[in-house]
Image (cartoon, rainbow, N blue to C red):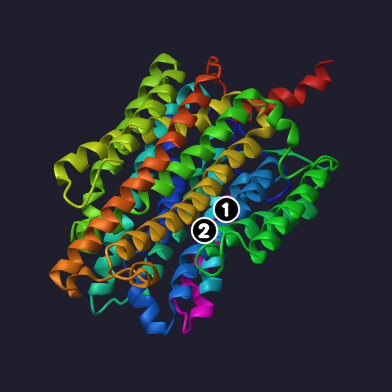
Amino acid sequence: MTTTAETGTAGVASTRAAMSRREVLQALSGLMMGIFVSILAATVVSNALPVIIADLGGSQSVYTWVVTAELLAMTATVPLWGKLADLVSQKLLVQLSLGLFVAGSLLAGLSQDTETLIVARVIQGAGAGGLTALVQIVMAAMIPPRELGRYAGIFGAVFAVATVAGPLIGGVIVDTSWLGWRWCFFMGVPFALAAIVLLQKTLKLTTVRRRDVHIDWLGALLITGGVSTLLIWVTLAGSRFDWLSGTTALMVGGSLLLLALAVLVESKVAEPIIPLDIFANRTVTLATVASALVGIAMFGGTVFLSQYFQISLGYSPTEAGLLSLPMIGGLLVSSTVAGALITKTGRWKRFLVAGGALMTLGFGLLATIDARTSIWLLGAYMVVLGVGVGFLMQNLVLAAQNDVPARELGSATSVLSFFRSLGGTIGVSVLGAVLAGRVAADLSALGSGPDDGAAAVPDVSTLPPEVATLVRDAYGDATAELFLIATPLAALALLVVLFIKEKALKTTTGAQRLEAEQQLPAAH
């Protein structure tokens, strides 16, 4: 094997010969550890936040911003990380993103006020954005598309375990007196540091030198500003100001202006953050649209399940986390099985179609729930949804990576991750507003007062029995309405993937393809 360790010089990751399966698994151990702790950081605070905000003396708006700050930073920075991966050392970038995550985690754990905590979450989010984009980019550099399926299954399994483990671990930490909430942030640090060391030893990518590296910082600034303004608007609209208001017009108009300027800049620079010509590729465009729809439907529809379990069905936060296991289990099994079958047969479109169909069916079934739906029936519905998402989400990335030049692997991968995350953020904010409005309207119609339903999430255990029943019913019906809204979005994602043309999976790694592409001019 002729690979050598990457240096810090500007260049694009490459390997002169395919890595053996053992070498791939060794390198993946560091990558998967990194992605695991980044997902864990996003989910571990969900059950711990009430304790954290109370201890730091924060308000309800701060409660929202501790969650939103990380999501904003992650979503806004993904395109920049993806473009940097096409230009400079991918190994260095992964380690840098892990370093940012460590710095943000330490600052969050040491925070003495809510302002410091929010800044720390922004730093964490920037690191998580790097890992979100770079892990899949480096996997594509090491592994041919034909073999990538089985390893994408590992990625899906890690994603699923971290998603369900986070809230459970957070609940245990805050309930353990000798630990305390600060360990929700500290616990990821040793794993991230171990990942940096593992990657230094196991990730062996040589560098194709690029002396003409140009990073479009103006484009990056405009994209980040435009997207952040849009996300802040969808986060605050409906609660801090009306959806139809002067503030909305100002923020949406400003966001569109910044994004229009970004498109203008991107069309003229030599190395755009998001190459506009990438959307001339039909597979990338369709996969991007499908990813955005999956993000809106999946995150927007499922993030409120925990609230449904606790308010409508009366379970504790820890029990609510356990009740999500059927969906996570379905996602884990389906992504692993699909990956193995794709590697064996080379056929992948059938899984996109099946995933779109099952996701639509799952949302349709969940649109029938109420405050008296059987847990077993709910579990069956969630398995259907989880299997559909497992078939669909990672294989959209595989289809796009297989159909772009190696020099655009970073951009294509980050574009899909970016639009999925953007869709999820918009979905959570908009559908959250729908849920709050529906609950307020239902309780008002029943004479319980609209403000009680809309102003805060009620503690049902403290309410009189007759009022508690009304609140449970209101939240059950409102949650079902969210799934009803998500169903046509999932159906539209199914329609989009039907138009993706199946192409044979390449048998060379992204790094080998890159070297071949760079040799073409010399051959002519």
Q: Position of residue 102 (x, y in %)?
A: 50, 65
Q: Position of residue 245 (x, y in %)?
A: 63, 63
Residue 329 appears in the picture as rendered? no
What residue do we see at 61% from left, 29% from top?
284
Q: Residue 71 has which mark?
A: 2
Please check the rendered image and state whether residue 112 is part of the magenta-colored stretch, yes or no: yes
192 up-or-down from 273: above or below: below
- The mark tally for this picture is 2
Report whether 6 appears left or right of 67: right
Q: Residue 2 has which mark?
A: none
Q: Specify the quadrant that holds the C terminus.
A: top right
Q: Position of residue 82 (x, y in %)?
A: 64, 44
508 up-or-down from 323: above or below: above
Nearer to us in this view, 76 or 347? 76
Local SS, label 1: helix
According to the picture, the residue beneath numbered tag 1 turns out to be 75
What residue do we see at 72% from left, 52% from top?
256
Q: Position of residue 384 (x, y in %)?
A: 28, 33
Nearer to us in this view, 515 or 313? 313
Please check the rendered image and state whether residue 256 is part of the magenta-colored stretch, yes or no: no
Q: Residues within 10 Å of mark 2 (few under 14, many from 20)?
A: many
- Under mark 2, the amino acid is Leu
Nearer to us in this view, 502 or 463? 463
In space, the residues marked 2 and 1 are separated at their CA atoms by 6 Å
256 up-or-down from 204: above or below: below
What residue do we see at 52% from left, 37% from top?
291
Q: Residues within 10 Å of mark 1 (few under 14, many from 20)?
A: many
Tell whether label 1 touches label 2 (CB within 8 Å): yes
Q: Specify the quadrant that holds the N terminus.
A: top right
Q: Which residues are magenta?
A: 94-117
Report whether 449 appears left or right of 283: left
